Amino acid sequence: MRSGATEEAFTSQAQHIIENRCLQCHSGSNPHVPNLSSFSHVSQVVQLDEGMDFFSLVRVSHTHLLGITFMFFIVGLIFSHAYVRPVWFKSAVVGLPFLAIAMDILCWYMTKLIPGFAWVIMGTGAMMGGCFGLMVLVSVHQMWFYKMPPELVGRDAASRRAIG
């Protein structure tokens, strides 16, 4: 149907399949389920969604780039004070969301040209969510429940005596 099938072709090739297998649920009686009862209804359902136009995409990109980056900065700043070893892992967890948001927004535009980039968008979203969740969980856990290792407690007390 997306490639321009006529109503006659729909009637002869697809309508009987839809009537036998789909109309029990897709008859139009439930407003939350797509209606497949006629050629015009099916034509509306199979229209390819090409997403936002370029100007809307630019507006949404700026909002996401500034807002989400600010949230990652604040949570990353809190997480940077957590006791996490090795340091390279801690640095990666703080830095990866910034790389992911840049890749994510770039792939919004690339998806307009090559639809396969939608998979990259899902991957970068998962990366951002995973890093954000890890930073929040570790930070909250260490603020509320974590007890410092004894070797660090002694080191902290010695450094306070040296300063004070």
Image: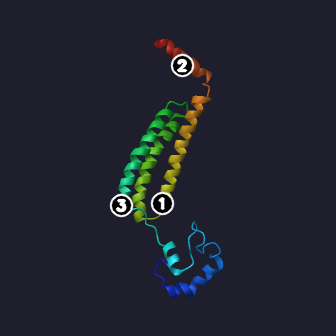
Looking at the rendered structure, the kind of residue marked 3 is: Phe
Quadrant of res 138: top right
Q: Residues within 10 Å of mark 1 (few under 14, many from 20)?
A: some
Looking at the image, is mark 3 or mark 2 nearer the viewer? Answer: 3
Quadrant of res 16: bottom right
Query: Which of these two is toward me, 59 or 116?
Result: 59
The residue carrying mark 2 is 156
The residue carrying mark 1 is 118
The residue carrying mark 3 is 54
- CA separation, marks 3 and 2? 54 Å
Looking at the image, is mark 1 or mark 2 nearer the viewer? Answer: 1
Earlier in the chain: of badge 3 and badge 2, it is 3
Q: Position of residue 68 (x, y in %)?
A: 44, 45
Q: Position of residue 152 (x, y in %)?
A: 57, 22
Looking at the rendered structure, the kind of residue marked 1 is: Ala
- CA separation, marks 1 and 3? 16 Å
Looking at the rendered structure, the kind of residue marked 2 is: Asp
Q: Which residue appears at 50% of the width and 12% of the height? A: 161
Q: Position of residue 32 (x, y in %)?
A: 57, 66
Q: Looking at the rendered structure, which numbered label has been put on residue 94? A: none
Is residue 127 in sight in this rendering? yes
